[in-house]
Amino acid sequence: MTGIKVLCIVMFGLLAGQGLAQSDSTARVPDSAAEISLSFAPLVKEAAPAVVNIYARRVVQSQRSPFEGDPFFGGLFRDFGAPRPRVQNSLGSGVIVSPDGFVVSNYHVVGQADDIRVVLNDRREYQSRVLIGDEESDLAILKIDTEAMPYLTLRDSDTVEVGELVLAIGNPFGVGQTVSSGIVSGLARSGTATGNGRGYFIQTDAPINPGNSGGALIDIAGRMIGINTSILTRSGGSNGIGFAIPAALVAQFLDQARAGKTAFERPWAGVTGQSVDADLSDGLGLLRPEGVIITALHRASPLSTAGIDVGDVVVEVARKPVNTPAEMLFRMSVEGLGEEVEMVYLRNGELFRTTVALIAPPDLPPREALVLSEGEVLTGLHVARINPAVTAKLGLPLNKDGIVVIEAGPLGRRVGLQTGDVIRRVDRFVIQSPSDVGPALRQAAPNVSIEAERGGQRLILRFRA
């Protein structure tokens, strides 16, 4: 029986080595007893020092009302009581990705922290700061001011294949650094992760638990293929469905951090699209469901400039197939601003190729941002003219125009205004520019009525100034 077990282990090790040799030229057939037994100990010993624990804290001002939770009075007295400082702590993981101390983690771990401590595997501690944080991608780049740090190299995540052996390294539940093993269960997962992260993910069955966020997903050559970010679960623990942000996007974040950027800049598509399912495929006369159909197009979109129109189906970006809007945006993001990318699209059953410039959302026409000063009716209200840059920042519908609320301010929030509200009128005065808001409010006082638009719905806000 022992001989059979040894033979099975040897055969599995040889098959694993042959499979990796086909997908990666640097892999080889195991040539030692340790490798044949598939022990991960040498790999963990090499990779673990580059995975760190992150302790983050921030001070927030909170108001606790005695009516909190009450279905009626809770809303009426939501601003009751004086604000009190409260400390929020978060625990997660990070990965050192360069010898000069650049660290990548999740935005939800460190994005809004006032104090960040990075603790290495050998118990050394460093203060750190966020260079770039992006809530939509759920990624953040931090910097440790030191040299000669252990680090993980990034593997091109487009070379990853389903079935590859992987390890997840992190600090689950704060118990200390832990390693779990599994395989790559799926690729090109989009719209399935929880939290703020949206986009394109690698799926793994390597157990990922709270505290693993920001940790490394590595291949058996010790290279990082992704950053562990979230799970799908009903119990709160790992059910074998975890997601990692591909290393290709991490590389783009790292490049921008090195270039001195303070916010992640992603290319602007200026389109709205949807995946082509079986019903759409039949209606479009396609042989099979594939691609992303363009349902709306901003007049300044670079895709429009390149000849793509509403109703066209984009099937490839940068010579990679795309089947969801998130995957399409991912492919553009990893190429980076200032580049050009080839897109393949279908129109009336015929394939076309075009080159699309990867640009930032234009800040034209000028946003004319304005904050109402002290003594105004709604002091602190921040408004701006809608343009592509504002649309991208606030997630507004394409081709929306008018004057939008960037930040309501304490008084604006009290009367019911929210970020993203489009102000159409103040009493009988039509609002055509940000500079119209203050004078219109003053003339309308003391009984003010604001007509606004929120989520496509018209609303009227009345208050006494």
Image (tube, rainbow, N blue to C red):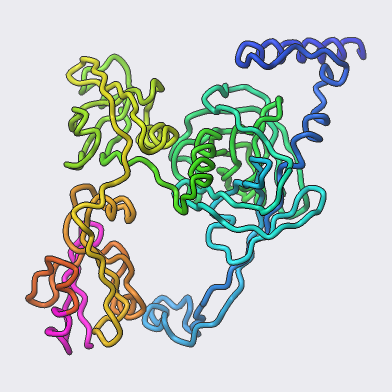
**Residue drawn at point x = 59 percent, y = 40 percent:** 227
Task: Report the front residue among 278 and 82.
Answer: 82
The reply, left or right, for residue 49 in relation to residue 249 is right
Give the farthest residue toward the left. Answer: 428
Quadrant into which the N terminus falls? top right
The location of residue 439, given as percent across then percent down, is 15, 80
Asked if the stretch drawn in magenta spans residue 178, the answer is no
The reply, left or right, for residue 462 in relation to residue 195 is left
Task: Report the front residue among 128 and 56.
Answer: 128
Task: Report the front residue among 242 and 100.
Answer: 100
Q: Which residues are magenta?
A: 439-465
User: Is residue 172 shown to the viewer in this render?
Assistant: no
Task: Report the front residue among 436 and 67.
Answer: 436
The location of residue 405, given as percent across then percent down, is 27, 66
Asked if the stretch drawn in magenta spans residue 464, the answer is yes
The reply, left or right, for residue 77 in relation to residue 460 is right
User: Is residue 247 shown to the viewer in this render?
Assistant: yes
